[in-house]
């Protein structure tokens, strides 16, 4: 089967390129037709891979693609989860190749070439590894577990309708473990398994001063400027030690033991290389924690977007009426995203000066999550990676969020295995997102080993 | 002549409407053809008004329209200055009528109707008063002074090329006084003359953190967020008393005497009405000064625009590479705009943390200005307004900037009379800019009186 996979490389890539050409941007309503095209494309490929049934399940938003192959009800069942939607491509002018026309380029991290396209790694390239691995297993009669596949179209916008779908389809989704490839390994020579993810609370704020845009000469200095006020409010959200000042924000944060912290720090990491890659003179963050801890086991608050006033060419001496920001917080166990959203809302309104009116809305969120390393799912992933890479994998904690993972546990009682093959340097959510061809092929090879070990350990 | 003016009202308005339909936005290069159309339109109207010659003078940017009528070289000469360019119309969605299709609407401040259009008050409506007043004076053989007219197309973007034009055409521009209608009166029943203007220094800043947009889950908390950093930097530009923290900023500010301050405070002003008009609960500004002082005799710093990260629909968990802001300062005597620009640049770079790279560019600027109330120009304006309105005018200080006024004094040795007829509530630089029909007609009536008194007092 390994030879078969190797010899089908070009076909796999050609198919993936077709997938990447569909601009399935879930955040933007003008891409609704592309979302449908992408869902249908995935469904067809799942049928072609040999799954017994595949269907497009409508939701209030973008549809979910579901498929399954039950070889023997007495065997364990793996539920594969992933998403066919992608982040918006903007700022498009910073892409070196068109975001929806996959281009292979050799890079220092990817000497065998990387596929540059929006969604190449997050998550189209990674879900397509599963489709092709299942195809190879079925073709060679080596599918060792039952398999169910659920690919959604709203991961990048909060998975709101997936929650409802999961709640209403508990029987259909019955399984023993959930397998997800939407995270990364440390390096192409350092396999790793993520043992945890951060949660997310995403907010949008509006600060309104006067009821209309004003001339900055006539009113400037006497009437509040909403941009200056918003800047002051944002600035006050962190203290001098990089701690978040939202009242109650840290109340439920679980501090890791020194042993756990040491274990995570054992994974290779080169701070100088990290700074060089980003072209920054200094890192920053919460006092008392390392860079890796700040990016994984500690909660954060970042402004993801800000706008207000005149932003065109040249100059305009306007005192704007309103200013806006999108602000998100990454959360860690046991912070609750809904509670944190409420704390933020209360705090942000409380710090507003009487010169302005503030409104805050919740975009979406998700709970933080931890995978137990003594579970058979974790062990199977560990063994599969060890065999495939010929190296012991390293446990890591991921800083990103897959909000649905906590919901899977709550609703289905299932743990999720974070079995990703990307690299952190693959520019996810950025211009020039890419995915190594090595990583893509390694994933297709390694997935069948997970099935093998999961079945063995389940006995 | 007064009757003649009254009976030509509809024709004056129809002509002005044609003028307002030309979208002569100087800040945006796609409007270059409209700028030329506007300049030609103005030139034709000046010739039709009876001026002896009118010409379009090319510059490195938008052209200047010049015209003159010399009736007798021994008589005093008035140089009328104004601008035919307008501010951008955005945000267009906030206009209640199309910005370049003049619409007459009755408002509480304008019971005789106001013309809603970009440039209606600033400055097309006001320069067209001069064209029509000159036409009436020539037609009735009542032109009592020589007149020169100079209308530029770059006032809203810093008048950079007008400076060169003035320097190179001192003979052509020789006059005894400059008359400018680009400011406001207190109310339609309270005539006023502005005795000073603030200067301006307009800057644009860029804050760069990492060399690319990053995933806020993977890097958030560990790498500087340029929006958070820019917000902190902007917040630090004012202290708790509303003073500007730029080092050296106040060094050359001339404090007004209590007598001068009392004189300016004598003009009618209703703070509750002011707050109600803007729908704000509280005013703000520099401690120790009144609202009117903050908006006129004190220097200010306002962010006119800010942008960075994802600003589209929905959410994107991006840690952006860059954030930007347009920041302008209003200046008072004896602050020098070039010196203040340099102080700002130095200060802004000095407060940048080592996690980011900052660049600052100067957009444009202008010096603050004061008109002496004992000059014959000021007296003629006072007398003309008193006769026309039947009320003693009030001296005021304007918070806006006409950067070229200080340059006129420096290059031509001429004082400028700020003889505006707008209202501060006319939404200059804002959506729904408008100009009262009463004000437009009052201007046309009052201008000939200025000529009369200026000639009498010049004897």
Image (spheres, coloured by chain):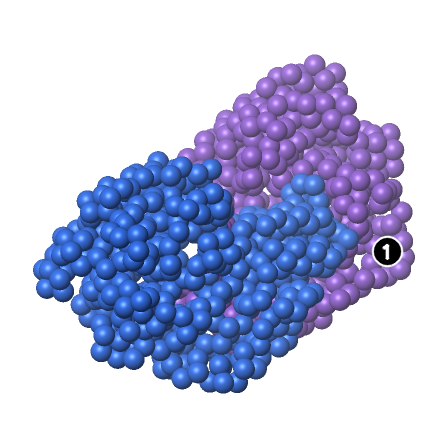
Chain colours: A blue, B purple
Report whether A260 appears left or right of B150. Answer: left
Q: Nearer the viewer, residue A4 or A173?
A: A173
For image coordinates 56% across by 28% down, the residue present is B98
Q: Nearer the viewer, residue B137 or A199?
A: A199
Query: Is residue A243 visible to us here?
Result: yes
Vertical placement of residue A164 versus B213, above or below: above
Give how far across and how far down residue B336 sits, in percent.
64, 63
Q: Tell me if mark 1 has few (under 14), some (14-19) or many (20+) residues whose alpha carbon lies within 10 angstroms of its own.
A: some
Query: On the rendered image, what quadrant is the C terminus of chain A found in?
Result: bottom left
> Which image quadrant is residue B4 in?
top right
Residue at the limit of the structure toward the top, as seen here: B7
- Subunit of label 1: B
Give how far across and how far down residue B17 sits, in percent.
58, 24
Q: Which residue is mark 1?
A: B261
Report whether A308 appears left or right of B439. Answer: left
Give how far across and how far down residue B108 sits, in percent.
78, 28
For image coordinates 41% across by 41% down, the residue present is A62
Give how far across and how far down residue B232 sits, in percent.
61, 66
């Amino acid at each position: 089967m390994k030879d078969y996979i190797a010899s089908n490389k070009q076909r796999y890539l050609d198919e993936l390129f077709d997938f990447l050409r569909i601009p399935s941007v879930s955040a933007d309503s003008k891409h609704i037709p592309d979302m449908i095209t992408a869902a249908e494309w995935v469904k067809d490929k799942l049928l072609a891979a040999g799954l017994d049934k595949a269907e497009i399940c409508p939701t209030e938003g973008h549809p979910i693609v579901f498929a399954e192959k039950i070889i023997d009800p007495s065997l364990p069942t793996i539920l594969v989860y992933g998403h066919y939607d992608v982040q918006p491509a903007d700022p498009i002018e910073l892409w070196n190749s068109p975001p929806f026309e996959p281009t292979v380029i050799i890079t220092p991290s990817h000497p065998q070439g990387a596929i540059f396209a929006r969604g190449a790694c997050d998550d189209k390239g990674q879900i397509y590894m599963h489709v092709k691995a299942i195809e190879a297993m079925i073709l060679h009669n080596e599918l060792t577990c039952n398999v169910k596949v659920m690919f959604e179209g709203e991961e990048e916008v909060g998975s709101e309708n997936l929650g409802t779908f999961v709640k209403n389809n508990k029987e259909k989704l019955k399984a023993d473990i959930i397998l997800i490839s939407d995270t990364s390994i440390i390096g192409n020579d350092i396999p790793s398994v993520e043992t945890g993810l951060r949660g997310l609370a995403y907010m949008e704020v509006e600060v309104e001063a006067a009821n209309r845009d004003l001339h900055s000469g006539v009113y400037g200095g006497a009437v509040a400027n909403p941009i200056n006020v918003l800047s002051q409010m944002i600035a006050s959200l962190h203290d001098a030690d990089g701690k978040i000042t939202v009242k109650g924000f840290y109340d439920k944060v679980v501090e890791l033991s020194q042993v756990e912290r040491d274990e995570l720090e054992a994974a290779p990491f080169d701070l100088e290389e990290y700074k060089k890659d980003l072209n920054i003179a200094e890192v920053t963050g919460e006092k008392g924690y390392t860079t890796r801890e700040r990016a994984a086991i500690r909660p954060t608050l970042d402004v993801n977007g800000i706008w207000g006033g005149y932003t065109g060419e040249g100059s305009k001496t306007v005192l704007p009426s309103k200013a806006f920001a999108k602000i998100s917080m990454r959360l860690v166990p046991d912070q609750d995203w809904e509670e944190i959203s409420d704390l933020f809302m209360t705090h942000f309104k409380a710090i507003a000066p009487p010169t302005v009116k503030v409104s805050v809305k919740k975009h979406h969120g998700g709970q933080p999550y931890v995978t137990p390393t003594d579970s058979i799912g974790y062990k199977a992933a560990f063994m599969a990676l060890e065999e495939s890479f010929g190296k012991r994998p390293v446990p890591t904690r991921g800083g990103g969020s897959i909000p649905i993972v906590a919901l899977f546990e709550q609703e289905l009682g299932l743990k999720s295995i974070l079995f990703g093959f990307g690299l952190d340097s693959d520019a996810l959510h950025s211009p020039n997102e890419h995915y190594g061809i090595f990583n893509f092929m390694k994933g297709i090879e390694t997935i069948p080993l997970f099935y093998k070990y999961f079945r063995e350990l389940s006995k």
